[in-house]
Image (cartoon, rainbow, N blue to C red):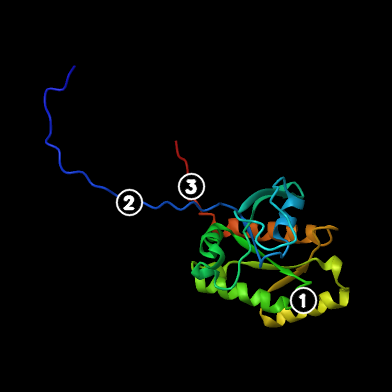
């Protein structure tokens, strides 16, 4: 059973291959550091990211399975992005790559921040500069920590964000749960619509005996 012939070999090749793992999630949570991303995913799923009152507590993306009205989807908590992220600032280029497979972005803006509108604009510019169609993905803007501000001020911020170009602005508090279910239902609606658009129609030939 030993082989009775051989083929002359040739000089081998050496390849240096860089593999990049991209998470698969329907929803990607983005925002500046301390916008409340980890707090939200911890409140909605079994994910347990590190949460603290200082920036850059999340160093790696976290995945969590979120459910609402007997429907589930996967949500990714992307570490805080900063200005210059598309060039690698704060390792932003690594984190932005995980958003390429997301169907929709949940952009959290800290309502207690110094300039929430500018914070939203900074990340929009980073998405556009990174490319890959990230700035074209559906986006819901979530004003977080509304339990710490007055309702009139929250409405004022929402109006300013819409005037700056934000499509949908919602209010939420991960601590009290206010507004969270409404956002989850909106996310599910977009995901299901996206699935319908991506579905490839299959033609079925008529059966004949």
Q: Quadrant of residue 58?
A: bottom right
Q: Nearer the viewer, mark 3 or mark 1?
A: 1
Where 74 sits versus 8, above or below?
below
Residue 72 drawn at (x, y percent) = 69, 48
Disc 2 residue crowd, few under 14, some 14–19, many 20+, Cα 10 Å:
few
What kind of element bears circle 3? loop
Asked if residue 166 shows in the view, the reply is: no
Marks 3 and 1 sit apart, C-alpha to C-alpha, by 48 Å
Q: Residue at x 51, y 64 (%)?
A: 93
Query: Which of the two discs, 3 and 1, labels the residue nearer the N terminus?
Result: 1
Left or right placement of residue 176 versus residue 28 in this view: right
Disc 3 residue crowd, few under 14, some 14–19, many 20+, Cα 10 Å:
few
Q: Which residue is mark 3?
A: 204
Query: Which of the two discs, 3 and 2, labels the residue nearer the N terminus?
Result: 2
Residue 158's tag is: 1
Q: Residue at x 51, y 67 (%)?
A: 88
Q: Residue at x 58, y 58 (%)?
A: 102
What kind of element bears circle 1? helix
Q: Nearer the viewer, residue 116 or 114?
A: 114
Residue 68's tag is: none
* On-image quarter of the C terminus: top left
Residue 16's tag is: 2
């Amino acid at each position: 059973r030993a082989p009775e012939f051989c083929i002359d070999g040739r000089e081998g090749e050496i390849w240096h291959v860089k593999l990049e793992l991209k998470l698969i999630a329907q929803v990607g949570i983005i925002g500046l550091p301390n916008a409340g991303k980890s707090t939200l995913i911890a409140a909605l799923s079994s994910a347990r990211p590190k949460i603290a009152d200082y920036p850059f507590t999340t160093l790696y993306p976290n995945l969590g399975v979120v459910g609402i009205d007997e429907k589930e989807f996967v949500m990714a908590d992307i570490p805080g992005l900063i200005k210059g992220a598309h060039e690698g600032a704060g390792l932003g280029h690594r984190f932005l790559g995980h958003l390429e497979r997301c169907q929709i972005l949940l952009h959290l803006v800290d309502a207690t921040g110094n300039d929430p509108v500018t914070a939203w604009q900074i990340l929009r510019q980073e998405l556009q500069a990174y490319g890959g169609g990230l700035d074209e993905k559906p986006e819901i803007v979530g004003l977080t920590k509304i339990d710490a501000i007055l309702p009139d001020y929250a409405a004022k911020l929402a109006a300013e964000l819409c005037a700056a170009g934000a499509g949908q602005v919602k209010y939420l508090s991960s601590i009290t749960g206010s507004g969270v279910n409404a956002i989850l239902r909106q996310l599910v609606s977009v995901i299901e619509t996206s699935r319908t658009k991506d579905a490839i129609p299959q033609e079925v030939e008529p059966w004949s005996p």
